[in-house]
Amino acid sequence: RKEVEQDPGPFNVPEGATVAFNCTYSNSASQSFFWYRQDCRKEPKLLMSVYSSGNEDGRFTAQLNRASQYISLLIRDSKLSDSATYLCVVRNAGNMLTFGGGTRLMVKP
Amino acid sequence: GAGVSQSPSNKVTEKGKDVELRCDPISGHTALYWYRQSLGQGLEFLIYFQGNSAPDKSGLPSDRFSAERTGGSVSTLTIQRTQQEDSAVYLCASGPSLLYEQYFGPGTRLTVT
């Protein structure tokens, strides 16, 4: 089992739709969680950190479920510019960051 | 302010040659990471540096790979006797410390012919 797993997609959604991605992690001692976005042939960019109580940044909401060992990202009112690959990142107790394989989102007009 | 920079942006080399890739982290960031990403694949951790501590080299795929960080700032990743399977984008990232998020540079696209 991979340490961090994501559905690779692609998720094809129309503009304005709400879409959610999940990411599961295997190490129960994992301490920090992040979502990054990566555009085609570009470097990953931090989208948001994920806090235990859940957090929201505009149209984006991140949640952490420690009991079930997953994090989620919800995007409301999808824009064409949201089309990208979304990477789930987990830091374990040894400070190693592990990246998931990414979930590809395609928002269509 | 200035982000993470990497050079060269593209490197084509012949199999068996050595290459050096450079990373300039964000000023003041003590943590520096190297990853590589093959086409259509996820990020593969290679090595990280945190301040003056010994680097974590656990991700280096073979002894042909090495990295150093001089003066706690600039880092170079060296690949000796390059092989075709080394072809990938090599990404550098820096962060305020190991506990916080990372900021990536644009990467160096290495092609071994």
Image (cartoon, rainbow, N blue to C red):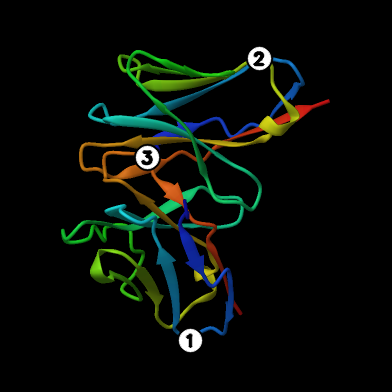
- What residue is at 53 percent from the left and 60 percent from the top? B107
| Residue holding disc 2 | A18
Query: How far is mark 3 from mark 1, CA to CA?
Result: 34 Å
Residues indicated by labels 2 and 1 sit on the same polypeptide chain:
no
Kindly give the residue lying farthest to the front in the view shown. Answer: B1
Helix, strand or loop for disc 1: loop
| Residue holding disc 1 | B17
Q: Nearer the viewer, residue A77 or A11?
A: A77
Residue A7 in the image, given as x and y percentages of width and height: 55, 30
Query: How far is mark 2 from mark 1, CA to CA?
Result: 49 Å
Helix, strand or loop for disc 2: loop
Does residue A89 appear to the left or right of A93 in the view shown? right
Residue A99 in the image, given as x and y percentages of width and height: 43, 41
Q: Specify few, some or many for label 3: CA neighbours under 10 Å numbering under 14, 14-19, or 20 or more.
A: many
Q: Nearer the viewer, residue A45 or A17?
A: A45
Foreground: disc 2 or disc 1: 2
| Residue holding disc 3 | B101
Does residue B35 appear to the left or right of A108 in the view shown? left
Chain bearing mark 1? B
Query: How far is mark 2 from mark 3, CA to CA?
Result: 26 Å
| Amino acid at circle 3 | Glu
| Amino acid at circle 1 | Lys
Chain bearing mark 2? A
Q: Quadrant of residue B79?
A: bottom left
Foreground: disc 2 or disc 3: 3
Q: Vertically, is A65 above or below B66?
A: above
